[in-house]
Image (cartoon, grey):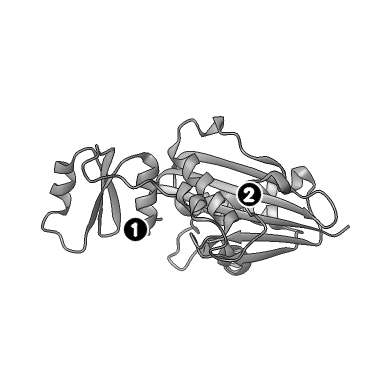
Amino acid sequence: MKKEVIIFTDGSSLGNPGLGGWGAVLVEKVEGGKSKVVELGGGEKHTTNNRMEMTAVIEVLKLVKKLKAGGDKLIIHTDSSYVINGITKWIHGWEKKNWIGVNKKEILNKDLWIKLQTETKGKEIEWRHVRGHAGIAGNERADFLATMCASEQNWKKEKFFEGPVSKYPYDILNTKPNAIKSDLRAKTKSKKKSSSAKAYSYLSLVDGKLMRHQTWTECEKRVKGVSKTKFKKAFSKEDEISIAKEWGVK
């Protein structure tokens, strides 16, 4: 019986470092049999976006081993070029140079690269880079789980889906961009608020450094008179993470 495992992963963080979360969706596709979906996710209080992207892949590969899921193909979809290039290209040079980079310092996230290398060893994996928020159901759902785990203190109470593909509420096997309905994408983004709504916080970005402020006065003091800055009112932790992603803060 022909089988393949399709995986979607994503990571999220507010600040660099800051609150972070990761999410993954695993689909064990069985031709002529019962295909199943398993969601998983987790979070950390002090981390980076890249570490969460890597952790998502590591943890879902551990699940593959635990479930003894496997088959003719193992396909991993991620919007992280860092993860794909690191594990398929850069890691070979890092090992030869004893994990020391051109700056004479130890390669960043060495601990996770070693774990990822261990989990991928002996597995035939096809890596697929996907553009974030392109309407691919699996990627959108992984993004939602990552954002939820980063922003919600009680994410462990969330009931992650596990069951047959036929009962999964999203068209997980459709990997064409813009294939999903807008309501799913809406779940991964903060709801729009009126400008008069009470702020949860204020964010400012100066010289690539993100800062969180309790009041507009604090935020204004940092950005006033400074060129090429960004600032925005946030209405929740999830909104903060969404803004940080929008600004490209990793």
Amino acid under label 1? Trp
> Compared with residue 162, is residue 138 higher up or lower down, i.e. above or below?
below
In the image shown, does 104 or 46 lie closer to the viewer?
Answer: 46
Mark count: 2
Q: Earlier in the sequence, mark 1 or mark 2?
A: 2
- Is residue 1 left or right of 240 when viewed as pictured? right
SS assignment at label 2: strand
For the point 47% across and 45% down, the residue is: 147
Disc 1 target residue: 247
Q: Which mark is residue 25?
A: 2
Residue 170, percent from left and from top = 61, 50
View extreme (left): residue: 225
Residue 224, percent from left and from top = 12, 54
Q: Residues within 10 Å of mark 2 (few under 14, many from 20)?
A: many
Quadrant occupied by the C terminus: bottom left
Amino acid under label 2? Val
- Is residue 222 left or right of 74 when viewed as pictured? left
Determine which quarter of the picture holds residue 177. Answer: bottom right
In the image shown, does 86 or 98 lie closer to the viewer?
Answer: 86
> Compared with residue 102, is residue 45 higher up or lower down, i.e. above or below?
above
> Compared with residue 155, is residue 102 higher up or lower down, i.e. above or below?
below
